Structure formats: C-alpha cells, structure tokens
Amino acid sequence: MREKCAVLGIRSTQNVFDSIYYGLYSLQHRGQESAGLAIYHNDEIEVHKDMGLVSSVFENVFLEGKVGIGHVRYSTQGETQVENSQPITIGYGGGSLGIAHNGHLINGFDLKDKLKRRGAVFTTDTDTEVIAHLIAQEHMKTGDFIRGVNGAMKKMRGSYSLTILKDDRVIAVRDPNGFRPLVYGRDGNQEVVASESCALDSLGVSFVRDVKAGEILVLGDKIESVRGARDKSSVCMFEYVYFARADSVIDRISVYNVRKRLGENLYRTAPVEADLVTAVPDSGITAAIGFARASGIPYGESLIKNRYLGRTFIMPQQEDREKGVRIKLNPIRSEIEGKRIILVDDSIVRGTTMKKLIKQLRDAGAAEVHVRISCPPILNPCFYGIDMQTSDQFIARRFRVEEIRGEIGADSLVYNSIEDLVDAIGLPQDKLCMACLNGEYPLKDEQKKLVN
C-alpha cells in the first residue's frame, strides 16, 4: 500500500493560515488520515499537524505568517502515525526546510541507504523525509537551493508533486513524468500551488496554469520557473477516472467532461433496455449522467450516501472498508422495486463492494441489475502513489469478465475499453500512465525489480 495525498502552498501579503485551512478542506477527498501545515514566520518554520480530518486537526489553532504549505495524507508508505504526517521539516547546514509530498519514489529505499551513509538521520519511514534530506545534501553541495532541488530531481525516480517551504519562498515541483497533478493560480493578494484546481476555486484564486512535468516553480518576490529533469509525460489516468474531484481541471482537461464522456462511451459500447440509470455515489455519478443522456433512460438515485463517512476505497484496512460499505450506502426501495437498473461505477478493484451493493439492490426489489464500469479492468499494481500494490487484490486478474459478473451477481457487466478511456480523456495514449491496465510501466528499468 502506498500513499495518495494532496499538497498546497501559498504566498500572500496577508496571513495564510485561513487560506491553507480552506484549501486543504477542498482537497480532503485525497487524504483523510492526517492533515498538517507549516508556516514561515520570524525566520522560523512553525508546524501543526495531527491525525484526523482538516476540521478537527486545526480546531482552535492559528499560526501567523504570510508563507506556508499544507498537506492531507492517506498513507501508507510509512505507518499510520502522527510522526509520518506532513509537512515534514528538517534542519541542516543550509538552514531549515519544510516539505509536503504527493506520490511515491520507487528508488526511495536505495536513496535512504545512501543518505544514511552520508550522515542523514531519519525520524520517519516516509519517502518525504528521504526527499527532504536529498534536497538538503544537494543544496550543501551546490551552494544554491534551487540548484539543489534540481540535483535531487535527477536522482529521484517515481512520482512526486511537492510543495517546499524555504525561508519566505514556496517552491512547487512536479516530477519529470507528471504522474500526479499540480496547478498554479494567483489573485491580487496571494499565489497558490495545489494538487487540484478545485482548491484554487475554493479560495477565489484564478487558475493560471498547470505546473509542467519536470518544472520547479518558485513563488518568491518574483515568479521563477526552472526546467528540471524531464521525461516522457505519463499523467495518471486514474486521476481522471476516480481520484480528482469532478470539478477539477488537470492539464487543462475537465475531469467532469472526461467522466461524462466515459459514460457516453459505455452506452455506445453496451446499450441495454432498462428503467433507470443510477450510480454508486459519488464516484460513478458523472459517468452515469453521461450514460443516461446518451441512452435517453432516466437518471435517478437508488443508493443514498452517508455523507459523514469517507471513501471506502481509501480506508487503509480491508476490514474498515467492508464495514464502511454497510453503513455508507443505503438503497431507496421506492425507486428500485420492480425496476431494471443500470448501475454505473468508476472501477472494480476487489469486487467485494460491488457484490454487496448488488445484493442490497436485489434485496430492495430490483428486477435486474446491469453493471457498467467506466474504467477498463485493473490488472497490475501501481508503484506511483496509488493504493494498489499487490496483484492479488484485483478480481480482473483472477477472472474473466463473465466470471466476474457471476461473482458479483450482476445480470450483465461491461467495462470501457482502453481505447474508449483514451478517447474520453482526450490525450494521446503515450501521454498517459495506464500501467495498472496494460502493464506498460513508464519507469521500466527500476520497475523490473519491483514487478519480478
């Protein structure tokens, strides 16, 4: 299991605490285990972080300062404990720095061993602290902090979107493949970098552009863009399918429009006679709307979500996920009874959740349940920051589609094809990372020892 998180950085003419709080609140969907922020004030970095949601972690807290970074975390490179929450700060010969990280280094263990031999002392077991020490050592070697960041990038392999706090500057970094999203926006008073554009919207900040793959963007007295290491673009397709909020824009592509087109493509591929198109909330809603509009079959709710529970997919323990399914979604019998239902969702990973939901619908009187999945079958582990690390999790690796249909108890089951996924996103296939679907890992040399 690895981490899927969100990062944020703000430089302003006013105190940034409230803005970081609201920005992290809008990114809560990306991590629900811990939250934290670091703010530069009076030549020091002050940090507040803890386990829990943003609303509880920052209750009755205020830190003064006009420059800061924030983070919400879903582990699991590093155990679930407050020591591994972010941002992480370190002191070294060049001063101190704070760092927040979304992603996963596939050469993190090798780097950590080398850094230890050079004298680095680690207090966590996260990739983030590895990156911090690597940047610090490169800074001391080059004598310039940004050159140090650039030097560190040349040694890191994997996915990383970073916000770094160094003195009164925020430095945003996106890995050379652009696996994870990172955006930049500004208004008259503040400049913001964030994992998703929805954070800019929540702060009333205008979107300017995406941070480019391999770019170091410095928010200081002036804006500075440095081209760091660069590789072939490999944007994670799962950001469009599931992870990002539907109102976000990634690399200038609307997530909402992608998901709607995925639903439309599902209808064109596999039309079926039915009375109601419905969704597994919230992840399947936009694709279900696309399916309904394309088919002319009415869209409606069949499952009501308990809004006080987080995403079952990103709960760290399987036992927690299974308990969550039972209390998270409740069927509406009056909408279901006697009807032929098309149930749309983004993906099937293990199959346990979908099986339970179909049983709930049948128990509520559904005459038929036809399942449509917007993402193609997931077959391979992800090593770039997504909670899918072992092949035995994937039902599609063990069963053919018709066998999965029987396992989950559906009347029919159809997935979008890879071609339809690429069509819906609107980027060339060679610009996307789809390793979990087709096994074509962008970082091939390092990947061999992980896959074998």
Image (tube, rainbow, N blue to C red):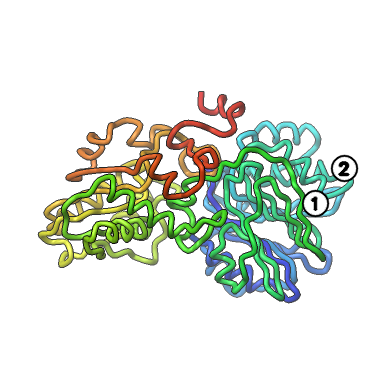
Q: In the image, is residue 207 above or below residue 92?
A: below
Q: Which of marks 2 and 1 is nearer the N terminus?
A: 1
Q: In this view, does 143 lie to the left or right of 377?
A: right
Whether residue 314 is visible, yes or no, is: no
Residue found 75% across the figure and 75% down from its top: 13
Point out residue 228 in the picture as x, y percentages from the top left corner: 74, 44
Label 1 CA crowd tier, 10 Å (few <14, some 14–19, many 20+)? few
The amino acid marked with disc number 2 is Thr
Residue found 46% across the figure and 40% down from its top: 388
Q: In this view, does 5 lie to the left or right of 131?
A: left
Whether residue 382 is visible, yes or no, is: yes
Tell me, yes or no, whether the two marked residues, 2 and 1, touch with CB atoms within 8 Å: no
Helix, strand, or loop for circle 2? Answer: helix
Residue found 40% across the figure and 34% down from its top: 379
Point out residue 203 in the picture as x, y percentages from the top left corner: 59, 72
Q: In the image, is residue 10 above or below residue 102?
A: below
Mark 2 and mark 1: span between their CA atoms?
A: 17 Å
Label 2 CA crowd tier, 10 Å (few <14, some 14–19, many 20+)? few
In this view, the mark in front (2 or 1): 2
Q: Which mark is residue 142?
A: 2
Q: Is residue 307 left or right of residue 434?
A: left
Q: In this view, does 249 lie to the left or right of 263?
A: right
User: How many numbered circles does the render carry?
Assistant: 2
Point out residue 92 in the picture as x, y percentages from the top left corner: 83, 48
Point out residue 357 in the picture as x, y percentages from the top left corner: 25, 52
Q: Which mark is residue 157?
A: none
Q: In the image, is residue 249 above or below residue 411?
A: below
Q: Residue 91 carries which label?
A: 1
Q: Which of 406 and 435 is in front in this view?
A: 435
Helix, strand, or loop for circle 1? Answer: strand
